[in-house]
Structures are given as structure tokens and as C-alpha cells.
Image (cartoon, rainbow, N blue to C red):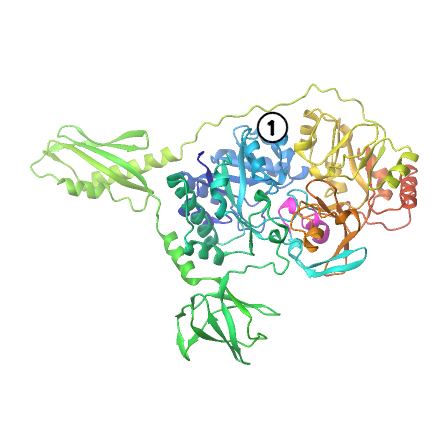
Amino acid sequence: MKKVELLSPAGNYECLIAAVQAGADAVYLSGKAFGARSFAGNFDNEELIKAVNYCHLHKVKVYVTVNTIVLESEFDDLNKYLAFLETINIDAVIVQDLGVLRLIKTKYPSLEVHASTQMNIFNEKGAKLLKELGITRVVLAREVHLEEVKKISKIIDTEIFIHGALCFSSSGNCLMSSVIGRRSGNRGKCAQPCRKLYSIYEDGKLIEENKSILSMNDLNTLDHMINILDSGVSSLKIEGRMKSPEYVYTVTKAYRDIIDQIYKEDKYKIDSKTLENVLVTYNRGFTKGYLFNELNSLLVNKEHVNHRGISAGKIVNVTKDYIEIKLTSGISLHDGLRVLSTNEYGLYLTSIYLNNNLVKSAKSGDIVKIFIKNNSKIGDEVVKTSSICLTNEIKEILKTENIKFPIDLTVSMFSGKRLNVNVKIDDYSFNVYGDVLEYSDQVLNEERIKEQLSKLASSVYKVNSIKIKTDNTSFVKISSLNELRRIFVYELNNYLLLKKDKVNPSYLTNSNVEIKAKNPLKIECVVSTDNQQEICEKFNIERIYALNGEYGGRINSNNKKFTHNIGNITNDSVISPYFNIVNKNALKLIEELGLKECYLSPEINLNTIKDLDLNNQDLNVGIICYGRIDLMVSKHCVVGSSKGAENKNCNSCMKHRYKIKDEYGNFYPLLLEKDNDCTMRMLDNHKLNLINYIDELKNLGINKLLLIFTDESALEVANILEMFINNKRSNKSFYTGFLNSKIE
């Protein structure tokens, strides 16, 4: 069985220590910029240096996330940041943006690069291409099944998520936060609209009301580790850069213990206390996720979106001043509780009464009184959401250095020769020397010598053995032993921090590709119905893509494929807007792949388009100019779930039209794809229309306009086509998306 890496999150320095002390083999973290969790504590440059040194002294790798899309105007700052990362000996950077990838491989080749899950790699083809581009590891899409993990792991090192929060949308394919709150998930500032309440409508009729239908349960694979380890995966990733040190320590330790058990005994047993600790630190309810084809009802939690902890008991009595709870698990002062009433609420225990006596704790079976004014009722469940005992236990663990590396010492003491200590760690050994020893009748006994050299409490080392070679006539000062100890600890640190040579994978370019001159401004269309396609053909639209699976199920004779994902790139690919292309380096990489056409990200605005200098680019570059953009693309269909279908292919999409409504009354149409995965696309409630900006876009170098038709009638399609073909500017005020706004 292949040895696997356990990879833990570090949102701040305290979390980093927790991960290392719990047994992580590697940590992932972010600087103050370019990381996909901008609201975590993160690390400034000084803290990054400190973090890398701390981890490397513990033989733990450090991966730095540079996994946002990066605007052209930010590349000067990005260059400075990457240059800094190259100097501090990090083990890899994690990237999403193709332009960032190209910059690193051309200018900072010593940096190892991992492909972020935001690249949404789900097949062997995508893995092969990224390997050719210099990627050494792929963080696979969360939607990948374990059988596919096995296949991809034969091509390249793979990393999968095994625990923590899940996104409803396919990674890199979510624009909902951008559209609704102008906070881009691709820029690290997701507002988590998927955790809100929504209602589902079928042909205009309400079928499910005010449920958290987009809120995924948290991933938990503790029960499936043998199967996962057998898959050939290289790294197991715990989500949680926004979580507490207690969460990081508890979850990391749980998986560490299980993995070690499997390697030792080929089996494992989950300790009940361990499981309780995992539950109480954070859970929304758990799922085994797409890795194991989880049932629909277990993928999402429609009833709540917050942390549920563990059951603490039920309310057995309520007055205006207090509640009484019959406990099913122990509680202590300063624990956190949540009462799951109609208007649920949380509290921290500042007092506990048992038999009318004030107590510090109570056990399962006790009936306790909690003074609080509330709207609870008898029978309401109470859950424990935090444990002060667990918190204090972990804090005590983190105060002391509990990871020690064994060293072997051989001390040579002979009069007339220099004091010598040989130090051995792993397969590496070295000597440190002191002063020339003088003859004396008074010599230190061996126990005292061993005692002095073993004083390593403040370091990461422990003495495994000490051998002493002496003529018993040599005088050794205590101060000399202390100085040698200081020196060999310094040398040991240098050894552990030694920068290892990295193998730079070949970066394949296709710079000799012949690029033809740009074509005049062209209109291309995406259609959803046969009627829409017929109208487009009547208007002589040369290239028509069909909304069917990967936008490619039905297409005219032009034979070009509209490609949303690296794993589906072919020689005939047209890069879709959902590749999130926003900078020159990304455009250059697309060109080097031998492709000639691409569309820019929907999140781009006029200023960022101007920065791309498209009039001096060889690629034919387009932008979405009309239609509803995809807010989310998901392998979980809320319609099938609402109708009680536990697996895919309930076929409701064949018969009805669906929308979901948010808390503000906005309706978002759903496109349910007739593919094997029952892919669901949630569309913007507004229709983009950039007709009044066509001349400006053309002057900026845009030469392809994409019109997306979803629920338009044949007449509406005809009117829109006539407007764009004839460039009929309008006095009407249209929704222009991000074109005139800045995305955070």
C-alpha cells in the first residue's frame, strides 16, 4: 500500500502548530494576497518565513495557495510575491489561474506547482495535459468518483479532499457570490450564498419552500479510509482554513491515528471519544460525498446550515426564567450549547444547576437547570457545539513540543585532543569539535555528561543514545558541553531546513503554431431548443453551440467544440468564458497550446479588457454579450432531491421547467442537462445585454460576441439577433453584468 500524505489547513500560525502537532505530513496556507480564503487570518511575509522554518524543522511540507484568478494590473505584485516565495524554500504553490501557471513555469521554474481544485480536473485527459504543462500534482475536483481517482493517480500525483466543507457548485464554476454580492469566489471572497434559504418552483408552482437546498453536508470519510488508501492517491486533504486550531488538531489527529493503524495492522477502529471530538469541533451533518456516490438526501442538509455538534439532551421543562435539560452527554461550564427550537439559539454555559446546586459539570442522565429567557418548548433537542474540556486539553498539548526526532551521539574525550561529538540523525551524521582537552585527575562522570548533552527540551530533538569514548583523564568543562550542544542543534536545524533540489518538469509550448490574422467581428450563439437553433440558422449564424452537457451535443458543420474544462480540450476547442481567463499570460498559454479562440471570464470589466491589449494579441478573443450566465454548475440536482429521487435520472427535467427563488424574491432558472451526471445549471435572474458597448468592445480588440439563449421564444431570438447583427444601440437601460463594476 502506497504511503499517503496527510495534508492539513493552516489559516493562521496557531492552526499551523495544531496541524503539525497532530501529525500532519504537510500543511497548506496562504499569504495576505492571492489566496482563495481571504477572510482567514493568513500569513504576512515574516510569518511565512517563520511557518516554513517551523514546518521544515518538523519534516512537514508547506504548500502556499496562489489560487485566485489574477488581473493583469496585479501581476507586478504577483511577481514580487512569487520571487519571495521562491527564496523561502516552500515545497509547492497551488494555482488555479492558467496565467499564473505560465508565469511560474517561465520565470520561477524552481517553484513546484500543484493544480488547485478550482481547475476542476476530473479525468485522465486533463491530468495528462497539466502534467505536460509542468504541474506535478493535481487536486482533483470534489465530484470525482474513487474509481476515477485510481485511473488519474496512475498518470500524476493526486490529492483529494477527505474532510470538511463542500461547495455545491463545481469548483471554479461558481459566479453566484459575484453576481449577488459582488464578492468573487474566484478571487477568494465568496459570500457563501449557497448557505441561504431557497424555494423550488415547477412550472410556476411551489414544490419546496424555504429550505437550504444548496447547502452541502460536510465531507467525512473516516469510515472509508482503507478504500481511499488503496486508490493510489498521493495526498489526503482536510478542508478548513477558516476553522479553529481545535478543529485542525482534532480532525488531523483522527485521520493520523486511522492511517497509522491501517499501515500497521491493515485495519482500524474509530475510537468513540475521537469521533465525539470530531463531531463537537465542527459538523453540519456529514456525507461521504461524490467519492462514493452518496445518496441525494445525504449530500445536502435542507434543514440547517450551521454547526450541529453532538446531542446533549432534550428539554424536559420550561419556565419564563429557565429550561431543564435531561442530558445524554456530559457538559461543563463554558461549553457551547444550541437549542434546536423553532427559533433556535446558542449560548455559552456560565452556570449549571444540578439539584438546585451550582456545579461545574454534569454527566449523562442528569437533569440540569439553565437560567435563560427563551422561547423553547418541552421536547426541543439541545446540542453541544463546543467543549471547554477539549479546548483546554488541546491548548495544553500545543504548549509543549510533542514531536521529537531521535538523534544518536558519540562523545570522544582524550587528553591532548579536541573534544568531539558525532551526531547522527536518519542516515546523516556530522562532527562538532570543542577545545583541546587537558590532563586532569578530576573528570566528569559519564552520567553528568549525558545529562548536559540531553538538555534538548526547547528543540525538536531527543537523544536516543549516547556513547562515550574516553581515557578517563580528560578535563571537560560544563560550559564546553553546553556550547557543543548549542552548535549541534544549530547544525541539525540547518540539515532539516536544507533546500532540496527540485526536478523541474518540462514546460511544453507550441510557439511555432501559425496564427492567422483576426477575423472581423463575429456573432456566435448558444441555444437551448431546436426552435432557437432554426432561427439562428435563418440569420446565417456560422457557429451554433447547443446547451447539452458540455455545450457540444448538437452543433453546426463548423465542427468546433465549446470547451469548459481543461479535461475536454481538443485541437478544435474554443475556450469558454468559464475558464476564467482575465490576464495576458493565460491568453498566451492558450495560444501555446495551439488554440486560436477563447472567451474572457464573465467577471471581467472594461478596464481589465483594456489592460489585455487585445489589438496586439494573436488570439481571436470574445465576450458574452447577451443572455443568462451560469451562476452555478452542479452534479447535484435539487429537483431530483426535492422529489425524493435518491439517485440520478429521475427524468423530471424532461417534463417540466424549474426555477428557484431566494429570500428577496428573485427567481433563478434551472437548466437540467440530459447527461449521465444530471448536471444542473443555475442561471442568473438577469439577462445580460451589452448592445450599447459593441463599438467600445470592438475598439478594445474583442472580435467575437457570444449570445446565450435559454428560455427565449423564437421571436425573441430573432429580435435579439437583429439587434446585434445590425448593431442597433438602444435608449433602454440594460443589465451589463460586471462590465462597469469592480469585483472584490
Q: Is residue 683 at least partly visible in the picture?
A: no
Q: Residue at x 74, y 19 (%)?
A: 514
Q: Is residue 386 left or right of residue 735?
A: left
The vertical placement of 76 against 15, above or below, is above
**Residue 724's quadrant in the figure?**
top right
For the N terminus, the image quarter is: top left
Q: Is residue 452 at least partly visible in the picture?
A: yes
Residue 132: x and y in percent read: 60, 26
Q: Residue at x 88, y 41 (%)?
A: 531
Look at mark 1 in the image and give the residue it sits on. Answer: 128
Residue 153: x and y in percent read: 54, 32
Q: Is 35 in front, or is 292? A: 292
Which region is colored magenta? 175-190
Magenta segment includes 189: yes
Residue 115: x and y in percent read: 58, 35
Q: Is residue 388 left or right of residue 516?
A: left
